[in-house]
Amino acid sequence: MTILKQDVRIPKNHEIKIKIPDDISENETVKVIIMKKDTSLSFKKKIKQIKNAINDKHFMNDLNETKDDFSSIDFEDWE
């Protein structure tokens, strides 16, 4: 899989031209994703959300699963 990332400013006409690398064949299917950074949250709101994450059961389950996944290798080759 090839992943290309480029930050661009949206022009007045709301059109972006994409230069496709030469190693991608004509008529090949690719996925184009537009991601916009959420700038609507203030710094204080972000901090509040981070602090509230400790009470989010799904977040804590994911965190514990990740911790368990890496527990067996945490001390590997640490001599």
Image (tube, rainbow, N blue to C red):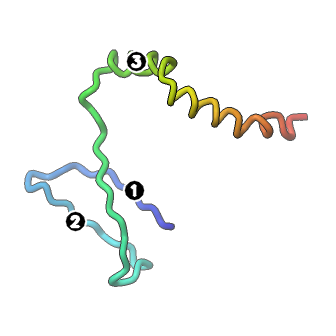
SS at badge 1: loop
Residue located beneath label 3 in the image: 47
- Dot 2 or dot 3: first in sequence order is 2
Q: Where residue 50 sits in the image (x, y, percent)?
A: 44, 21
State the separation of the CA atoms marked 2 and 3. 36 Å
Residue located beneath label 2 in the image: 17
User: What amino acid is labelled 2 in the image?
Assistant: Lys
Q: Quadrant of the C terminus?
A: top right
Neighbours of disc 3 within 10 Å: few (<14), some (14-19), many (20+): few
User: What amino acid is labelled 1 in the image?
Assistant: Lys
Identify which residue is drawn at 51% across, 25% down: 57
Q: Where residue 4 sits in the image (x, y, percent)?
A: 41, 61
Give the residue furthest to the front: 57
Q: Which sits in the foreground, 69 or 20? A: 69
Are dots 2 and 3 in contact, CB under 8 Å?
no
Give the residue furthest to the right: 79
Residue located beneath label 1 in the image: 5
Identify which residue is drawn at 8% across, 56% down: 13
